Image: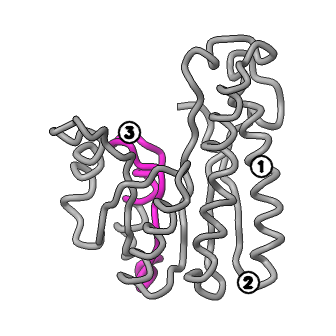
Amino acid sequence: MALFAGKKGLILGVANDRSIAWAIAKEIMDQGGVCGFSHLPDKPDDEKQKNRRRVSKCTDGYENAKFLVPVDVQKDEDIAAFMQKGKEEFGEIDFLLHSIAFADRDDLAKDTIETSREGFKLAMEISAYSLLAVCNAAKPILSANASVLTMTYFGGERCVPGYNVMGVCKAALDAAMRYAAYDLGLSGVRVNAISAGPL
């Protein structure tokens, strides 16, 4: 029997066919799981909808890829709409993958102490706070014994030269994961992080 037969869940963070999130989602679907996907919203003037097309090129061949909707994790209404779509499609979900991180390229190129205030806020909001926001929004549709998974990196535990502000964000993400695990663990939901190493 396939490992994910009968399981349903949501995938946040596929950008293209090289994304860690896609490798995980593909394996889930190959093992019988059913997934709903998000994609980065396209700019209003982008008639080609590049972000959506990159993800749909991955999912189009899979019957168990049920939907694809735009989600900006800086917007609570986008997160709520994604969860509502999951509820309408699945009723409740058995797994949730959070594979989202971002820092401004200019800030990544600087020494950590030179990170701009706005760049720090942006990187933290998208890379760490979004896990808490997503877990909170998903709570009503998480099944008993559901699993939430996020992607971290060793650079949040030890200083990795060149990782800079993203290392601080991963440290915050690791702490957010532990506290979310405590909050949701009371209802049987597990929250874990995988460090996949540099790609």
What is the number of the mark on residue 188?
2
Residue indicated by mark 3: 18
Q: Residue at coordinates 39% horizontally, 57% vertically from top-left?
A: 38
The first of marks 2 and 1 along the sequence is 1
Q: Position of residue 127 (x, y in %)?
A: 63, 42
Tell me the kind of residue under disc 2. Gly
Q: Position of residue 41 (x, y in %)?
A: 36, 46
What is the number of the mark on residue 136?
none
Mark 1 element type: helix
Report how far apart the C-alphas of labels 2 and 3 lie in the structure.
32 Å
Q: Are marks 2 and 1 in contact (CB under 8 Å)?
A: no
The first of marks 2 and 3 along the sequence is 3
Q: How many callouts does the rendering have?
A: 3
Badge 3 crowding class, 10 Å Cα cut-off, few under 14, some 14 to 19, many 20 or more, is few
Tell me the kind of residue under disc 1. Asp
Residue indicated by mark 1: 174
Tell me the kind of residue under disc 3. Arg
Report how far apart the C-alphas of labels 1 and 3 lie in the structure.
24 Å
What range of the chain is rendered magenta? 1-26
Mark 2 element type: loop
Q: Residue at coordinates 72% horizontally, 40% vertically from top-left?
A: 170
Q: Are marks 2 and 3 in contact (CB under 8 Å)?
A: no
Report how far apart the C-alphas of labels 2 and 1 lie in the structure.
20 Å
Q: Position of residue 63 (x, y in %)?
A: 22, 71
Q: Position of residue 137 (x, y in %)?
A: 60, 70
Determine whether 27 is above or below 63 in the image.
above
Q: Quadrant of residue 59?
A: bottom left
Mark 3 element type: loop
Determine whether 50 is above or below 116 in the image.
below
Q: Are marks 1 and 3 in contact (CB under 8 Å)?
A: no
